[in-house]
Image (tube, rainbow, N blue to C red):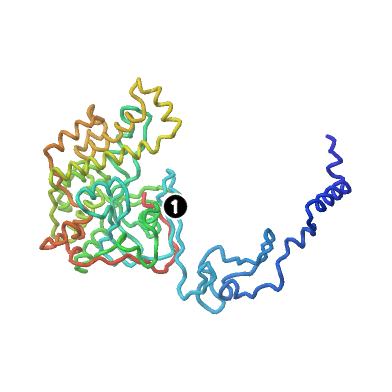
Amino acid sequence: MHRLEWLDNRNVRSAALGCLALLCGIVLLPREAAAACRQPQPPQSFCGDPGCGTVVCNTADASWECLYPAYPGTPCPGGGYCDGAGTCTANPPIVTSSFNNSSGKNACGCIDAQWSAPRGALVLIDSGDSGVKRVVSAFGEQYTHEMIVQGPGSAAQSEETTPVITSSCDYPIDVNSLEFGFPGMEKSINVGAIYADIYGGGSVQFSPSGTSNKVTWQLGDPTRANAIADALDAAPATDVQVSPGQYVHRILRNGAVSPYSLYQFMNIETTHLGASGSSLNNGAVSSTFCAYAYALGGPPMTAYSYPQDQTQVAAGNLWQYTYDQCVGDVSWGLKVASLFLAVAGCDYPTVCGNAAAMVLNCTVLGGGYCGSNVDSNNNSTWQAVLSYSNGYTISPDRLGGLTRFMNETPRPTTWASDPQHQLTWSGGGRVCGCFE
């Protein structure tokens, strides 16, 4: 192949550049001179404390800039730790990160810190807008999730991954993943997993010194709290790998795993009685799990009967949230295509309506109404039940004796006798883990 020699002729290029320079009234300088930073070089203090930053010349714009260690926590020459922004501090900075599990879910994290919540304490989390938030808001309550502290680096909870979506227009959610939420009751999740669960989604901002009242803890009677933690430590569990080298420890209740069961939002059955209690599918949700664990450490708490009209509003809120999330996940192209599928009942409003109906029937009736029964995608099914039914369960706010339970005496739990404390974090060894 022949080169176009005229493009490589330096004389032609120089002449052209010279003419251009005259026309524009500018002086062309050598490339090296244009990229040089003004002398003298700034002192090291320009970039902060000794050893925490290096002065460098940015040749792109001929400016002096600071290069900081890629990983905060580098030891300072005179003692202490670099914070990653040029300052040497007495304590190592807390570094966090998140990563996906083997299923592609953002359910894993790393942190080099421990939390301030004491052993056996109840941790309450307000995770912002979600299906659960829409439900509790209908009752004038705040918190959406909770954990029980097993130690400075571990906790127990009940959690659910997002149900699997199917290609069916009539039943667009996988029945098994909706009815038997994974992982359900789990224990000994480490601080990496705890960080990912509380802060990984971004709705709660991580702050070592606390995040207002978004994440709080309550201890109450330390003897009762330790008894709860002791029972959770002793609870049998089975391990399931969720990412290379990462496992969740599913608690065995009544000899079997306890999946996340949406029906517990409507009816706790006798889960709150602890070892002597039972429930449909042996299931629980995060708040009813905490009630279950509370009974393992002493006398059980009582459930609460929510008025029928408020229960109806809460269910409507959950339906709308589920429908909106489904519609929001449908791409523009699929929305256009669905117009042509409407004649077959497979347009996206119909599909998302079916998905919302499945979630509500699973929540209000449970069992086969999570998708196995013929009416499980019918909105009239759950609406008929809620025309006369109350909700009977335990919420996060009831566990902590908050909002509508603030003045209840005796207090609903020993946790509730303690005021709320902001959750804080302090330095520790780096730990990574997954919560699902």
The image quadrant where one finds the N terminus is top right
Whether residue 86 sits left or right of residue 299 in the image: it is: right
Q: Position of residue 397 (x, y in %)?
A: 21, 56
Whether residue 23 sits left or right of residue 425 in the image: it is: right
Q: Position of residue 194 (x, y in %)?
A: 36, 57
Under mark 1, the amino acid is Gly
Return the residue nearer the eye: 97 or 53: 53
Residue 161, by quadrant, is top left
Residue 44, by quadrant, is bottom right
Return the residue nearer the eye: 373 or 321: 321
Residue sticking out furthest to the right:
11
SS class, disc 1: loop
Return the residue nearer the eye: 13 or 183: 13
User: How many marks overall?
Assistant: 1
Disc 1 designates what residue?
Answer: 245
What residue sits 31% from the left and 39% below the top? Answer: 322
- Measured along the vertical axis of the image, is residue 54 above or below residue 290? below
Q: Position of residue 134 (x, y in %)?
A: 26, 47
Residue 38, by quadrant, is bottom right
Q: Residues within 10 Å of mark 1 (few under 14, many from 20)?
A: few
Q: Position of residue 264 (x, y in %)?
A: 21, 45
- Measured along the vertical axis of the image, is residue 192 above or below residue 88? above
Return the residue nearer the eye: 244 or 23: 23
Residue sticking out furthest to the bottom:
78
